[in-house]
Amino acid sequence: MAGEHKLDVEVLTPEGEVWSGEVRQVSTRTQSGQIGILANHAPLLAALRPTELRLHVSEGETVRYAQAHGWLQMFGNRARILVEEAAAPGDLDAGVLRERRSDAERRLSESEEGGADFARAEKDLERADAFLAIAEG
């Protein structure tokens, strides 16, 4: 069936566009939990947490990215995913991610709870953990 219930998706980072096209479904993680977005979804604005972003292009094709913190905007059958970082699983280096995790843990232990440095270290640790889980598959 031509035009079968698809939605337009853009995945954007501060460096630019990572992916753009039509998909059957977007699967990601918001502050409230896992979410699946289908065509003609109600308008939505949601904060995103690090996870594996899955773009279900067709029945047998899924494009995957390690997704950092960001935002999902759904409006007019178009999903915009704006994230700090998006990397293909094959581009992730588990050794580098372990170093990032150790650095974030160190900064977390050295920071005062409730402060800006503590919050940044928490976010960096959450991202390193999610990306490492994706890298190790």
Image (cartoon, grey):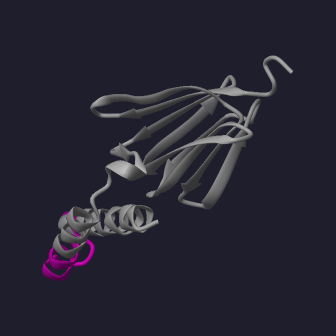
- Residues rendered magenta in the picture: 104-116
Indicate whether residue 82 is drawn in magenta: no
**Residue 69 can be seen in this image:** no
| In this picture, residue 29 sits left or right of residue 121 | right
Q: Residue furthest top?
A: 2
Q: Is residue 97 above or below residue 1?
A: below
Question: Number of marks in the image?
Answer: 0
Q: Position of residue 25 (x, y in %)?
A: 69, 40
**Residue 117 can be seen in this image:** yes
Q: Which residue: 36% across, 66% down?
A: 132
Q: Is residue 59 above or below residue 136?
A: above
Q: Residue furthest left?
A: 110
Q: Quadrant of the N terminus?
A: top right
Q: Position of residue 104 (x, y in %)?
A: 21, 71
Q: Which residue: 13% across, 80% down?
A: 110
Q: Position of residue 81 (x, y in %)?
A: 49, 37
| In this picture, residue 52 sits left or right of residue 136 | right
Q: Is residue 36 above or below residue 81?
A: below
Q: Which residue: 16% across, 73% down?
A: 107
Residue 8: quarter of image = top right
Of 57 and 25, the residue lying toward us: 57
Per the picture, the main secondary structure of the magenta-coloured stretch is helix
Q: Which residue: 82% across, 17% down?
A: 2
Q: Position of residue 87 (x, y in %)?
A: 37, 46
| In this picture, residue 47 sits left or right of residue 120 | right
Q: Is residue 86 above or below residue 92?
A: above
